[in-house]
Amino acid sequence: MPHVVTQACCGDASCVFACPVNAIHPTPDEPDFGLAEMLYIDPVSCVDCGACVTACPVGAISAHDRLTAEQLPFVDINALFHETPRSYPAQAPVTPLVARTSTDRLRVAIVGSGPAALFAADELLKRPGVRVTVIDRLPTPHGLVRAGVAPDHPSTKTVEGLFRHIEEQPGFRYLLGVDVGVDVTHDELAAHHHAVVYATGASHDRRLGIAGEDLPGSTTATDFVAWYNGHPDHADRTFDLSGHRAVVIGNGNVALDVARVLATDPERLAGTDIADHALTALRASAVREIVLVGRRGAEHAAFTLPELVGLVERDDIDVEVHGDTLVVPAGTDVMTARKLDLLREAAARPRRPGARTIVFRFASSPQVVDADGDGRVAGVGLVRNDLVPDGGGVVRAVATRDVETVSAGLVLRSIGYRGVALPGLPFDAASATVPHASGRVDGMPGTYVAGWIKRGPSGFIGTNRSCAQETVDALVADANAGLLTEPAGASSEFRRLVGDRVAAAIDLRGWRAIDAAERAAGRTEGRPRRKIVRLDAMLEAASTSAASRRRRPRLVRR
């Protein structure tokens, strides 16, 4: 009874090190680890011990005879990966931690509270004497796990259980609702901590650079995702869902998420943690067709095989494919070939009455966003591309003169993310990252980076663990070498400084109060939570919940 990794895989490799026979690959020391869409269990090597099941933080591993119907394709997918023989030792090599050579107090500020930040905190707290303060401008932590994961992917969000464990470790502290660069400066952080780690992600979207891109009705998929996930910055946004068709430029996992949410019967979303305002708008939506536009062919699509499996297994969404024959080119790797097979099978299914449709339109690029008489989005001019291999064998999209206008009332671009410059830190505009060496910020001793602001927008939730470990190892090595400056101010002085400038900075107890209020509100409707989406309501939840326990609210007040 071999075990199987399924769609929910976060790629943090906990299962790799739990496996006693090294049956799970790629491992962090293998060159394809950072590129893999998920991890895969070799059905031949697996000894069915179940150690991987308990190690997985998102419940992505099951015995093959306990899979749901939607998960059954992953039996073949796990086996496919291991069809190519791999040479590896009997046990996956574990990278040793850089141990501290002193037990003296080491205070570290981490800016950001998403996966990279919390994994960095976890790595730091494994060492004796370390105290960590995680700072975020929002009143709620967990970054894209809270505000980016689609509401119909609840298994992916179970990594929050791991985050809760990290938060409860001795030496961990939150200061939420504090904007570094506005409320406090980098120099002030550095003056009160031995080191500062920035894990702020990549929060801006790449632009198309075409006419009409900024018309009303044309925006980013990131904004749409933040809106339906209840991000407080987007609580008052509105999206025109009155048209029959929406166009999404891009074909990565975020584009697929957006298309799937638009195509899903809202009643299937009613039991999720989707924001109330988004559920109301989707119930009134007239959108019945969502076109995903990719500039190259299907074999070059950026969406992952697990995400495609999750889509084509849906019984309420039809799939069409335009602009590609879906013939598997010679030399195609087995996972890409499986993608093409799945698309071909899904497109060949009979259409189902009443089902919304996702159209994959390949070999096309947006040329212009057209306006109607009121100056709003009316459609997108798409140019057909010829796919031409260059001298190095890389396929390039070459625009033809064949242009078609596709009518649409909503256009969302999803063509990648960019990091933004951080006050007081160097910034490489070309890569949109902070220049560094193994996480050490160039020219700034005691300052470090982790996550997307370090390596760019690549990898998955769990990829941030190995990224954070590299950064923390560098930080600890610097501490051991005496390269970190002793803070001029005490931690209590830093808290007073924040209290003088921020009306209500929320600590861990305050976040627990918000979390409990959301979960309690959700339970009455059979939902995991009902998200609080407004800042004042979040502060109120932190205060009233603490007061109901006859304790003062754990807020740092002016």
Image: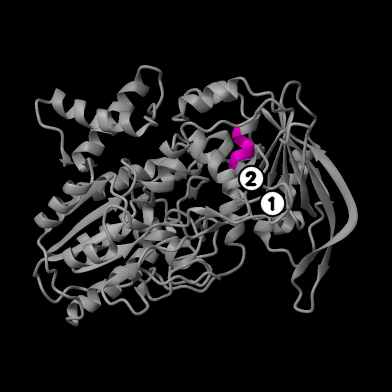
| Number of the label disc, if any, that sits on residue 504 | none
Q: Where is residue 178 in the image (x, y as percent from the top left)?
A: 28, 48
Residue at left offset 28%, top offset 61%: 185
Q: Tell whether 461 sits left or right of 415.
A: left
- Quarter-wise, where is residue 376 in the image? top right
Q: Is mark 1 on a helix, strand or loop?
A: helix
Look at the picture and state if 147 lies above or below 484.
Answer: above
Look at the picture and state if 317 lies above or below 25.
Answer: above
Question: Is disc 1 surrounded by few (<14), some (14 to 19) or many (20+) residues within 10 Å?
Answer: many
Look at the picture and state if 279 lies above or below 403.
Answer: above
Q: Tell whether 507 sits left or right of 147.
A: left
Q: Is tag 2's residue or tag 1's residue first in the polypeptide sequence?
A: 2
Residue at left offset 64%, top offset 38%: 259
Q: Tell whether 358 sits left or right of 188.
A: right
Look at the picture and state if 255 lies above or below 273.
Answer: below
Residue at left offset 45%, top offset 61%: 452
Q: Position of residue 104 (x, y in %)?
A: 8, 70
Residue, disc 2: 308
- Quarter-wise, where is residue 222 in the image? top right
Q: Nearer the viewer, residue 475 or 240?
A: 240
Q: Position of residue 201 (x, y in %)?
A: 43, 57
Q: Magenta segment range?
A: 257-261
| Number of the label disc, if any, that sits on residue 339 | 1
Amino acid type of disc 1? Lys
Q: Position of residue 151 (x, y in %)?
A: 49, 34
Question: Is disc 2 surrounded by few (<14), some (14 to 19) or many (20+) residues within 10 Å?
Answer: some
Identity of the residue furthest to the front in this view: 374
